Structures are given as structure tokens and as C-alpha cells.
């Protein structure tokens, strides 16, 4: 031992300040301030997927918040900036979710007889049907009814709704 070395006895409690422990086995360790070193990762996406390193509390919170649907999101009325496509084969209005989180989309209309179909996938022109509503009037009065489609859009996916484009359309997104 040199003049600056500290010897830790097994049967005694000692406070170590600014010490680096190499290959230690700590049993019931108490760490009172910040933890640092190469064993501590600060990465919000958990990309390293390590089984020997620990993540900071901030990294864990950021990662969970990025995956949790609805956390930090609010409903937004996008009726004035979204449109229903009247063609499903070449839709005029395709949108992309670039929020970094899944979003929920709900579209509604007052109709007497029509179909609504929601499309969503990773293609720039989605072909996967994720919701469909079909309304047929059974009476001669052709009563009006509110019809809607609601679906989840993963981050970086494209989406559109096919159906009649009327003035009674509403479009809201949880984003």
C-alpha cells in the first residue's frame, strides 16, 4: 500500500469517496450520489441492449415515454387540414405519422348510405385495410346516421381514409 491507498476491511463499514472499484462484488451497496463510468449508459433508445450495463433513470423514462401510447399526446381537430380520398386506388390525400409515437385517428361523417375504409401501412400509398364501416339504409326515408372509422397509425407509417367527401366530415387525431 502507498500513502493514498485505502484498505477496506470486510467486517467494517467504511465510506469511500472518489474511488474506482475494479471487478468488485458489492453486496447491499449504498450509492448516495451520481453513478458514473462505462457500466452506466445514458441512451434514450436502449440501442445497445446490454445485459452487463445499467441505464440511467432519465434514459428509462425517455424510452418508456417514446413507446407509451397517449402519454404526452392530445386530441387535435384536423378537420380543416385533412380530407377523405374519393379514390382508393390513387388517393389524393395520404398522410404520414412522423411524430415518433403511434397516433390514433378517428374520422366521422353524417351520411345516409356509404362506405368508409381506412388504410395504413409503411407504403407511401397504403393498401392494408385497418378499419371499414359500411352503412346501408333499410328504409325509404334514408335516415342520416353518423359513421366513423378509428385506427392506430404506427410511427413512420402512411394512412388515408377512402369514402365520400362531404361537408359533414370530422377528423381528429391523438398525437
Image (cartoon, rainbow, N blue to C red):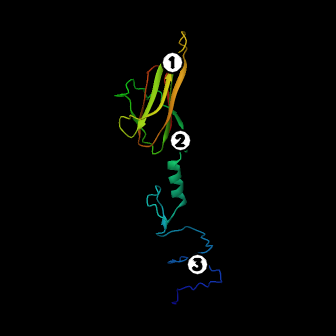
Eyeballing the image, is 28 above or below 89? below
Q: From the image, tell me which residue sits under label 1.
A: 136
Q: Which of marks 2 and 3 is in front?
A: 2
Q: Do the residues labelled 2 and 3 touch (CB within 8 Å)?
A: no
Label 2's element? loop
Q: Residue at x 53, y 41 (%)?
A: 73
Q: Do the residues labelled 1 and 2 touch (CB within 8 Å)?
A: no
Q: Residue 24 carries which label?
A: none
Label 3's element? loop
Badge 3 crowding class, 10 Å Cα cut-off, few under 14, some 14 to 19, many 20 or more, is few
Eyeballing the image, is 58 above or below 103? below
Mark 1 vs mark 2, CA separation in Å: 35 Å
**Residue 127: % across, % down:** 38, 34
Pick whichever of labels 3 and 1 is earlier in the sequence: 3
Work out which residue is located at the far front of the displayed protein and give it. Answer: 138
Badge 2 crowding class, 10 Å Cα cut-off, few under 14, some 14 to 19, many 20 or more, is some
Q: From the image, tell me which residue sits under label 2.
A: 73
Eyeballing the image, is 80 above or below 142? below
Q: Nearer the viewer, mark 3 or mark 1?
A: 1
Pick whichever of labels 2 and 3 is earlier in the sequence: 3
**Residue 173: % across, % down:** 50, 34
Could you say which is closer to the camera, residue 44 or residue 69? 69
Mark 3 vs mark 1, CA separation in Å: 77 Å
Q: From the image, tell me which residue sits under label 3.
A: 16
Q: Which residue is drawn at 41% across and 40% down?
A: 157
Q: Nearer the viewer, mark 1 or mark 2?
A: 1
Mark 2 vs mark 3, CA separation in Å: 45 Å
**Residue 72: % across, % down:** 54, 44
Amino acid at each position: 500500500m502507498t500513502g493514498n491507498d485505502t484498505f477496506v476491511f470486510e467486517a467494517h463499514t467504511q465510506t469511500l469517496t472518489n474511488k474506482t472499484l475494479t471487478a468488485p462484488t458489492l453486496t447491499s451497496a449504498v450509492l448516495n450520489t451520481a453513478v458514473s463510468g462505462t457500466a452506466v449508459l445514458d441512451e434514450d433508445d436502449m440501442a445497445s441492449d446490454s445485459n452487463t450495463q445499467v441505464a440511467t433513470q432519465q434514459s428509462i423514462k425517455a424510452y418508456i415515454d417514446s413507446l407509451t401510447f397517449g402519454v404526452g399526446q392530445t386530441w387535435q381537430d384536423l378537420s380543416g387540414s385533412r380530407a377523405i380520398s374519393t379514390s382508393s386506388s390513387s388517393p389524393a390525400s395520404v398522410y404520414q405519422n412522423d411524430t415518433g409515437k403511434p397516433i390514433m385517428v378517428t374520422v366521422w361523417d353524417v351520411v345516409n348510405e356509404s362506405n368508409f375504409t381506412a388504410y395504413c401501412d409503411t407504403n407511401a400509398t397504403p393498401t392494408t385495410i385497418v378499419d371499414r364501416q359500411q352503412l346501408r339504409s333499410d328504409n325509404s326515408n334514408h335516415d342520416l346516421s353518423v359513421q366513423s372509422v378509428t385506427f392506430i397509425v404506427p410511427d413512420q407509417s402512411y394512412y388515408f381514409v377512402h369514402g365520400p367527401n362531404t361537408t359533414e366530415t370530422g377528423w381528429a387525431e391523438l398525437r
